[in-house]
Amino acid sequence: MPVIKQISKYLLAAAFILGGINHFVMPEFYLRIMPPYLPAHLFLIYLSGFLEAGFGIALLIPKTSRRAAWGIILLLIAVFPANIYMATNTELFPDLNPLIIYLRLPLQFVLMAWVYWHTKDNGKSKMESGKLRQNIK
């Protein structure tokens, strides 16, 4: 794996592990951004925090890295309604700059693209992978 991709993976993992832990440390922030139509707000906050931290850890384990990356992408999609809720109700968040709230929307897609890069096969060509499989047999 190229060094830049390794560094990227460690940065992503750290961000998601710390972000997931933050759901347990500061649940009141996440309670504020939960759309009212969703049930069991605190449960969903803890669940998303657990998944976020868990996928971050799994991203560092070679056997689970690709699945973890897909899990993070699905999680980013699942929490997107909270970002939309914030953007459509900025008056509920007077302590946050509205520009930051609006920037969270496209940032989710940047994060998804970044994580998607880690679903790829680390630069091995299909031909190299095929030769390796033939040598194992």
Image (tube, grey):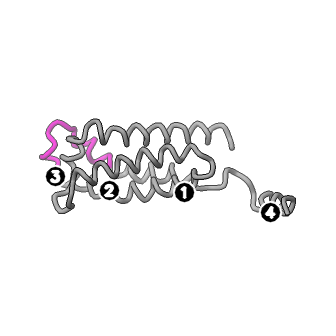
Circles 2 and 3: CB atoms closer than 8 Å: no
> What separation in Å lies between label 2 and label 1 (alpha carbons)?
20 Å
Badge number at residue 130: 4
Badge number at residue 89: 3
Instruction: Decide: few, some or many residues near mark 4? Use Cα within 10 Å; few <14, some 14-19, many ≥20.
Output: few
Q: Position of residue 4 (x, y in %)?
A: 62, 38
Amino acid tagged 1: Arg
Q: From this view, report whether residue 2 is shown above or below residue 72.
A: above
> What separation in Å lies between label 1 and label 4 (alpha carbons)?
21 Å
In the picture, which quadrant includes the C terminus?
bottom right
Mark toward the viewer: 1 or 4: 1
- First in sequence, mark 2 or 4: give its number: 2
Residue 109 vs residue 94: left or right? right
Instruction: Decide: few, some or many residues near mark 1? Use Cα within 10 Å; few <14, some 14-19, many ≥20.
Output: some
Badge 4 element: helix
For disc 1, the marked residue is 67
Q: Residue at x 69, y 44 (%)?
A: 1
Q: Residue at x 56, y 42 (%)?
A: 9
- First in sequence, mark 1 or 3: give its number: 1
Q: Position of residue 23 (x, y in %)?
A: 30, 42
Residue 89 vs residue 34, the one in the foreground: 34
Q: Which residues are magenta?
A: 90-104
Mark toward the viewer: 2 or 4: 4
The answer to if 126 sits in the magenta stretch is no
